[in-house]
Amino acid sequence: MMNENIINEYKTAGTIWKTVRNELFEKLKPGVLLLDLATFAENRIRKLGGEPAFPLNLSINDIAAHSTPSINDKATLQKGDLLKIDMGVSVNGYLADAAFSYCSEKTPLIKAAEAAVAAAIDAIKPGLRVGELGGIIEQAARDHGAQMIINLTGHGIDQYEFHVPPTIPNIASGSRETLEEGMAIAIEPFVCEQRTAVRESAPIEIYRYVTDRPVRSPDARIALALARDTYKGLPFARRQLTSTLSPVKIALAVRELERLGALVSHAPLRGDAGTPIAQAEHTMIVADPVIVTTR
């Protein structure tokens, strides 16, 4: 059983997430700079008393996840782009991880993704098998004319940690693992027109601290300390280091640290070329009834 103080930390993170989500939605229109969206969201999270749990993910069309603007990025949202906005908020390490999709033109995929999450929320209770939950998510998407990205899943959440057990499939599976009361989890279906999988792509902008390593470069030591102490092992973007290091020094430092195994990268995840993908996601605490912190 999760104690009330921790539940309140999760709820506070969720309240910040909802506030910034609403403000972001007002800014979404063709022509907006993606970098402006990311900068706004990350600064607002801090102003409201949280910390970004990861760089704002802004993934367009056939990119499902892990895309964020680069340093001095000039990319803009185009008319008809299907944009996934995945945002994380940390309050003392307790996380709100949730996402929504936007398109300036009507697409049934957004409604399908939202329906899949809603069906999961209605079904979640202690003791539910995650394999059964995956089938509920998948069927809801199918009922709205959509199919699933089969190799992306929901996941458990812990303090300063994403992607802890349980792994929650978005398709029916034989998994007998069950949800336990007090688990913090994120449900995040990704839907498209045809059942498919995603693969790693480029360019890579997001990294995460793994462990200390002996490094020769002073700039690499600075970057490593920031990854460990400022971001506390949560993902960060190269652009978030520019207040301390120049873009060239960041590139060299990150390359060295990844080669040494001190950092790992999170590559953009891309589906079939030209196939749009929608995402919806909420963070919740398993209970009866379920506590959804980001809705």
Image (tube, rainbow, N blue to C red):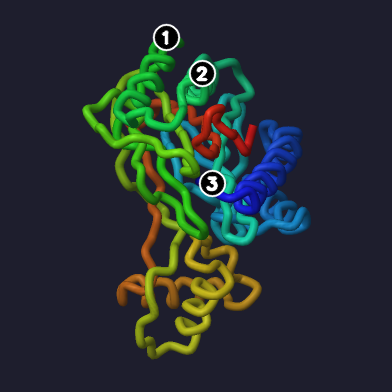
Q: Position of residue 280 (x, y in %)?
A: 52, 30
- Which numbered disc covers residue 143? 1
- Mark pair 1, 2: CA separation: 9 Å
Q: Which residue is mark 2?
A: 115
Which comes sooner in the sequence, label 3 or label 2?
A: 3
Q: CA distance from mark 1 to mark 3?
A: 28 Å
Identify the amino acid type marked 2.
Answer: Ala
> Upstream in the sequence, badge 1 or badge 3?
3
Q: CA distance from mark 3 to mark 2?
A: 22 Å
Q: Is residue 2 left or right of residue 152?
A: right
Q: Is the residue marked by circle 2 packed among few (<14), some (14-19), or many (20+) residues within 10 Å?
A: many
The residue located at (42%, 53%) in the rendering is 203
Looking at the rendered structure, the secondary structure element under dot 3 is strand
Q: Position of residue 35 (x, y in %)?
A: 64, 51
The three-letter code of the residue at mark 1 reads Asp
- From the image, state whether disc 1 or disc 3 is nearer to you: 1
Residue that label 3 marks: 57
Tag 1–tag 2 contact (CB < 8 Å) = yes
Q: Residues within 10 Å of mark 1 (few under 14, many from 20)?
A: few
User: Which of disc 2 and disc 1 is earlier in sequence?
Assistant: 2
**Where, by quadrant of the figure, is residue 211 drawn?**
bottom left
Q: Position of residue 23 (x, y in %)?
A: 76, 39
Counting from the top left corner in percent of width and height, residue 62 is at: 42, 33
Q: Which corner quadrant of the image does residue 260 belong to?
A: bottom left
Residue displayed at 52% across by 34% down:
287
Foreground of the two, 92 or 87:
92
Specify the quadrant that holds the C terminus. Answer: top right
Circle 1/circle 3 CB separation < 8 Å: no
User: In the image, what residue type sits under mark 3?
Assistant: Asn
Q: Which of the two discs, 3 and 2, sits closer to the camera?
A: 2
| For residue 256, above or below residue 74 | below
